[in-house]
């Protein structure tokens, strides 16, 4: 069996602007994002840590690293999924996020899973 099938983790993202927590006058744009992580492989794998790259529309970049997600280090057995919601604040009307999860297979193999880039946009800014 190929190594790719053993460690096949899919990541999907939904992002939403939170106008009630944002302030355009203060260049504060708040977004929530919900991430679903699914184990389509054959080996149980645990999410150990995360690495985010947050791009503001003004060209500035913020990197965030930390253990787990929302205080958890979920173990995903084959066929399992884990969903969580978190948030971020950017100073521009449009930005983006991408990153990776660092995973450990139950068999001791460590690997990274890419978090696809997604857009953070105040409504009606991008047509």
Image (spheres, helix red, strand yellow):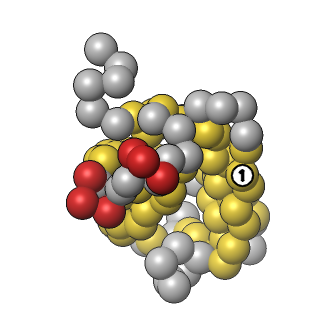
Classify residue 6 as left or right of residue 31: right
Quick one: 20 or 113, which is closer to the camera?
Answer: 20
Residue at the spot of label 1:
62
Quadrant of the snapshot with the N terminus? top right
Whole-percent x and y of residue 27? 50, 47
Q: Is residue 43 above or below residue 126?
A: below
Residue 3 lies, with reference to residue 77, above or below; the image says above
Instruction: Report the front residue among 114 and 65.
Output: 65
Q: Is residue 37 something that shows in the picture?
A: no
Q: Secondary structure at mark 1?
A: strand
User: Residue at left 55%, top 46%?
Assistant: 91
**View extreme (top): residue:** 127
Classify residue 97 by image quadrant: top right
Q: Residue at x 39, y 34 (%)?
A: 121
Q: Position of residue 43 (x, y in %)?
A: 54, 64
- Taking the spot 48% from the left edge, 78% from the top edge, the residue there is 70
Is residue 26 at least partly visible in the picture? yes
Out of 61 and 105, give the one closest to the viewer. 61
Query: In this view of the protein, which residue sits in the foreground, 19 or 42?
Result: 19
């Amino acid at each position: 069996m190929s190594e790719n099938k053993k460690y096949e983790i899919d990541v999907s993202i939904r992002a939403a602007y939170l106008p009630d927590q944002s302030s355009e006058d203060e260049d504060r744009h708040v977004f929530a994002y919900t991430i679903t992580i699914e184990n389509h492989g054959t080996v149980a794998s645990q999410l150990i840590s995360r690495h985010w790259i947050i791009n503001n529309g003004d060209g500035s970049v913020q990197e965030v690293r930390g253990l787990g997600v929302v205080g958890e280090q979920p173990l995903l057995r084959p066929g399992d999924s884990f969903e969580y919601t978190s948030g971020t604040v950017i100073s521009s009307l449009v930005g983006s996020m991408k990153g990776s999860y660092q995973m450990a297979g139950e068999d001791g193999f460590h690997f990274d899973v890419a978090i696809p880039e997604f857009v953070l946009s105040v409504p009606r800014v991008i047509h």
